[in-house]
Amino acid sequence: MSEPDTTDTTILTGSAYRDDRHLAARQSLYRWQQPTYDLPGLVLEHLPIRTGTVLDVGCGNGTYVTRLRSQRPGLTVVGLDISPGILATVSAPVVAADAARLPVGDHSATAVLAMHTLYHVDNIDAAVAEAVRVLEPGGIFIASTNAREDKAELDDLWARAAGEVLGVDRGPRRISLSTRFALNDAPQRLRSHFAAVETVELPGTITVHEPEPVIAHLASYRSWAENIGVPFDATLTRARDLLQHMIDRDGRFQITCRGGILLCHTTRHDDKARYDR
């Protein structure tokens, strides 16, 4: 069994993000999280600029693009994604582009976003270097990701279900997209590119009283099913049965979340004020 390649562009553009169906399923699980976080609102809170160009790299279904355009009409917000298919639902201007090869001039953007994106990039440091290249002096790079221990309860559920399907004590762990760019060490990695990096932790607990939101989340990883070492549909069915049993027994199923936003500045804090507008 090999680790699934979550950077394979054929899978990313042809299946995983051909449209926003799988992405929307993953996003929807957070409806049951407490406390709730308005992620686009948090980006706006840490984005003081009112004019200039913002690039949303890996914009997906345009959640951030739409919100920024609505609340900051003075900004030019450009959505970029490697998948032309998922961009079909996002209003122009949008560009199909690789995060490591942005079709943008040097120092032409006031801010660059990479929200839950960098773990899909083959060369993460090259993509971050591209963000630095296109940012103007005083610009900000905002990224987000999850910690390695995020949603550990789903790891246990999937491994138990897979183990029962395979007839072993514990099966392979579920696919975790964040592993390649985890919140645990992402700040240190970004500090090699930026003058200052701040982390905004976003802990929470998801509580569900029926299996469907969790099963839909797990099913959204189907694009990588061939590489996870278990019969995907059989494991999903067994996970549903196990989950229903736990909910019947406990009245709920809880998932511990640990995500965060990384605020990366091209200048030090004591120099940044003169660039804010």
Image: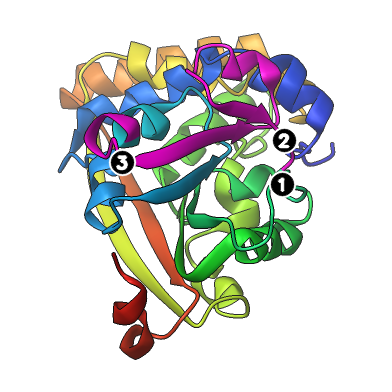
Q: Compared with residue 85, is residue 141 higher up or lower down, i.e. above or below?
A: below
Mark 2 to mark 3 CA distance (whole Å): 24 Å
Which amino acid, by three-letter code, is at mark 1? Leu
Q: Which residue is mark 2?
A: 97
Q: Which residue is mark 3?
A: 74
Q: Nearer the viewer, residue 262 or 157?
A: 262
Q: Which residue is mark 1?
A: 102
Mark 1 to mark 3 CA distance (whole Å): 23 Å
x and y percent of residue 125 in the render? Answer: 71, 64
| Residue found 62% across the figure and 38% down from its top | 170
Q: Quadrant of the N terminus?
A: top right
Which amino acid, by three-letter code, is at mark 2? Ala
Q: Nearer the viewer, residue 184 or 122?
A: 122
Q: Compared with residue 249, is residue 21 higher up or lower down, i.e. above or below?
A: above
Residue 89 magenta-highlighted = yes
Which amino acid, by three-letter code, is at mark 3? Gly
Quarter occupied by residue 40: top left
Span colored in magenta: 69-98
Quarter occupied by residue 227: top right
| Residue found 37% across the figure and 52% down from its top | 259
How many numbered marks does the figure carry? 3
Do the numbered discs 2 and 1 sit on residues whose CB atoms are within 8 Å?
yes
